[in-house]
Image (spheres, rainbow, N blue to C red):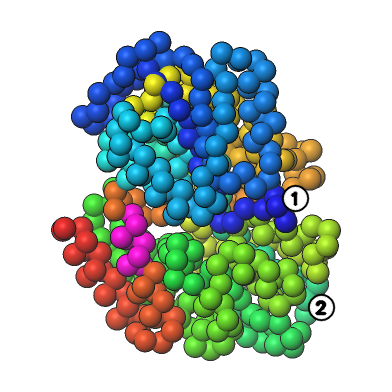
Amino acid sequence: MRWMRTAGRALLVLVVLSAGCLTSGGPSRPVPSGDGRGPLTLATAGDLTGYLGPLLEEWNRARPGERVTLVELPDAADEAHAQMATDLREGDRGRFDVLNIDVDRTPEFAASGWIRPLPRDRFALEEFLPPVVATATYDGRLYAVPYVTNAGLLLYREDILAAEGVRPPRTWDELERYARTIAPRHGVGGYAGQFLPYEGLTVNAVEAISSAGGSVLDADGRRVTVDSEAAREGVAFLARGVREGWIPHEALSYKEEESRRAFQEGRLLFLRNWPYAYTAASAEGSKVAGRVGVVPLPGPEGPGTSVLGGSNLAVSTHARHPDTAASLIAFLTGERAQRQVLTRGALPPVRADLYDDPELVRAFPHLPTLRASVLSAVPRPRSAHYDQVSLVVQAVVRDAMTGRETPGSAVRRMARELTALAHR
């Protein structure tokens, strides 16, 4: 299915080439001279849906002197990030001017001096879902503009729960009980997420810890806060599932697509995944089409907390035509383009009004649930060293889920390793 995306991690990585002078900013970086208007090159980490081309054609017809040429980076988010970081380290010799970076990369890029602060009055931020704007700020300043958002959801088999006469789970206790008792009666696995040790496991772990009321780092990313009873409860939830069997052992090898296929092929009762998986499982040709429901992620006492996914558009410190770059960002985050992000790209938009549009809700019935999940979502740990933070979380939680370490011991180790990282 060429139109599908995975976890918000294969979201567009847009890069616009040019130069000039928007609000200058980027720490200790020179601001190029120029009139700020001119052609652009837009690079993406794989436009899997094909919706971006028509949008850019519309831009090019209206602005022949500021044409955008599309260039694709690798689909994998880590590879795209590596190429962007390498290019940005080249300074004014680099090619990239505007980058659509994963939401967890804003602090890294801002702290490195690779992107410049942006003037808030150029963009309709007041029309965006509030949590997405927070992902685009660093040290109290706007360094990017939200472009696509995402939040984790719980997919479930409506037909199986209806046959058992139960409602979809709102708490961990209900999820565990149904996954342990109902799933075996229908010959399916209980519950799965993305549990291979990669970024997806970090997301699942942070969601579990946050749902229990804990956190990994404080809001500024400067203090380690994970050594808490809430964090132990969240890690224990995941570890218990594997130990008791209601999380299938096979799920320890799942990324987004593996878990999506398992659910779509009728092998799971419950699945934590991003909205694209609900769209795919509900589409014609899916083995479970017409039998899929979706609700917010459960938590210990009620609805839990998702991690906020998505991507943000930022302007390189060395952009040669930054005024055009800002205009392009405003265009791509405008109402018309954002509508196509959803209808043609099957990606969650950042503009709040689209989630209440009756026509869109009829076509995408999960929008109200997704909106609620985005509004209550939390960002991944904010750190200029996010890669290292994520690797620590993955490794420690993996050891807890495979029984190499108790949840309590795992959380204490996570706190030690993150503290050591903070003092490097």
For the residue carrying disc 2, how many other residues have a C-alpha within 10 Å: few (<14), some (14-19), or many (20+)?
few
- Residue 389 in percent (x, y) is at 32, 60
Res 365 label = 1
Q: Is residue 247 left or right of residue 289?
A: left
* Residue 299 falls inside the magenta stretch: no
Q: Is residue 1 above or below residue 226?
A: above
Q: Which mark is residue 277?
A: none
Q: Report the residue marked by disc 2.
A: 163
For residue 54, above or below residue 398 = above
Seen at 51% across and 45% down, the residue is 73
In the image, the segment drawn in magenta is 386-393
Question: Who's the residue at 48% across and 83% down the image?
Answer: 240
Q: Is residue 342 left or right of residue 317?
A: right
Q: Give the Cα separation between the discs numbered 2 and 1.
A: 22 Å
- Identify which residue is drawn at 34% across, 84% down: 405
Q: How many neighbours does mark 1 have within 10 angstroms: few (below 14), some (14-19), or many (20 or more)?
A: some
| Foreground residue among 1 and 372 | 1
How many circles with numbers are drawn on the protein? 2
Query: Based on the displayed image, in which of its 4 quarters is residue 120 positioned?
Result: top left
Who's the residue at 79% across and 64% down the image? 286
Q: Main secondary structure of the magenta part?
A: helix
Q: Is residue 320 visible?
A: yes
Locate the N terminus by quadrant.
Answer: bottom right
Q: Residue 320 location in percent, x, y?
A: 39, 21
Kind of residue sitting beneath label 1:
Pro
Q: Is residue 388 one of those drawn in magenta?
A: yes
